[in-house]
Image (cartoon, helix red, strand yellow):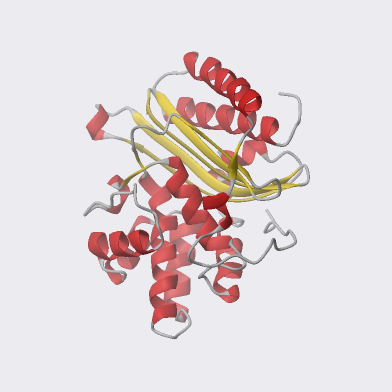
């Protein structure tokens, strides 16, 4: 997968990314999409929620965000944001070691790498402080990063901070993020990529049989898509699927319905 490339949008203060001022979908389109996603999920086990920000159109959409979800390895993207901002506050670039560990954390979803970087940014307290500073206020880090709880719109905001050309992350670090998330190993490239069609995608997925749900599966996918002339930031979170495969099918089905509607393609 190649890193998505689009022309930068209008200048925006780092204290308020474009996402926070994006318009909701027009009422008729939102109601139609609500019905489509509701019908899809009625046929699927467990529960799921989705948020998407169409940078090209300046619109956003959220569905069933009332309760948070366990992030599993999607939390590694939040850790990556924390790592980059910590280094930038210190006025330095990531070290070669940090880049190597971050590469393993994102491209192959290495848990030991995530443990190391989570500790480096101050663990639960450090990540919580970073996220709150960035306006990501409905995400609740845990002592164990994988059980961090969040909502899709918060993860879209994390993606926005990581990729906004006028945001707080330096150009060099943004390029590094794009390279990592567009270079995940093939076996982990499912999820929101199902909605990209012939376009490009940079993503990170998370999956685990959650003991809190009796071993039922949490399956999540977040990413940046460029498809059909649109640039989109998308997060689909799900839980209580009977298998990983069932959870992947749910996530991919939701992603396809939402993206096709947002960019005006037949579903």
- Which residue is more in the foreground, 103 or 167? 167
Pick out the residue farthest to the bottom.
Answer: 91
Q: Residue at x 39, y 54 (%)?
A: 136
* Residue 208 in sight: yes
Snapshot quadrant of residue 7: bottom right
Occupied quadrant, residue 130: bottom left
Q: Is residue 145 rendered to the left or right of residue 155?
A: left
Up the image or down, 103 lies above or below 160; here it is: below
x, y (%) of residue 157?
48, 52
Left or right? Give the position of 224 relative to 84. right
- Give x and y (percent) for residue 65: 41, 34
> Which image quadrant: the C terminus?
top right
Please name whichever residue, 232 or 45, is drawn nearer the observer in this view of the structure. 232
Question: Residue drawn 43% across and 63% down?
Answer: 80
In terms of depth relative to the viewer, which is nearer, 10 or 49? Answer: 10
In the displayed structure, 147 sits above or below 108; it is: above
On the image, the x and y values in percent for residue 12 come to 60, 65
């Amino acid at each position: 997968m190649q890193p998505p490339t689009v022309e930068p949008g209008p200048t925006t203060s780092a204290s308020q990314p474009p996402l926070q001022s994006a318009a909701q979908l027009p009422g008729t389109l939102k109601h139609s999409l609500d019905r489509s996603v509701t019908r899809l999920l009625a046929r699927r086990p467990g529960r799921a929620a989705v948020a998407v920000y169409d940078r090209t159109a300046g619109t956003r959409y959220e569905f069933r965000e009332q309760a948070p979800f366990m992030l599993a390895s999607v939390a590694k993207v939040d850790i990556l944001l924390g790592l980059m901002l910590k280094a930038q506050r210190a006025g330095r670039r990531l070290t070669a070691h940090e880049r190597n560990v971050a590469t393993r954390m994102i491209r192959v979803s290495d848990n030991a790498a995530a443990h190391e970087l989570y500790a480096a940014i101050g663990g639960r307290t450090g990540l919580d402080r970073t996220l709150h500073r960035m306006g990501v206020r409905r995400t609740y880090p845990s002592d164990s990063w994988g059980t961090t709880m969040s909502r899709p719109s918060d993860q879209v905001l994390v993606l926005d901070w990581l990729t906004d050309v006028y945001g707080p992350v330096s150009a060099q670090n943004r390029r590094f993020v794009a390279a990592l998330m567009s270079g995940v190993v093939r076996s982990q490239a499912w999820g929101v990529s199902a909605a990209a069609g012939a376009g490009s995608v940079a993503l990170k997925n998370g999956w685990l049989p959650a003991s809190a749900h009796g071993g039922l599966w949490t399956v999540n996918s977040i990413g940046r898509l460029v498809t059909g002339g649109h640039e989109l930031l998308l997060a689909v979170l799900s839980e209580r699927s009977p298998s990983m495969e069932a959870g992947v099918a749910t996530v991919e089905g939701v992603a396809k319905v939402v993206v096709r509607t947002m960019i005006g393609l037949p579903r």
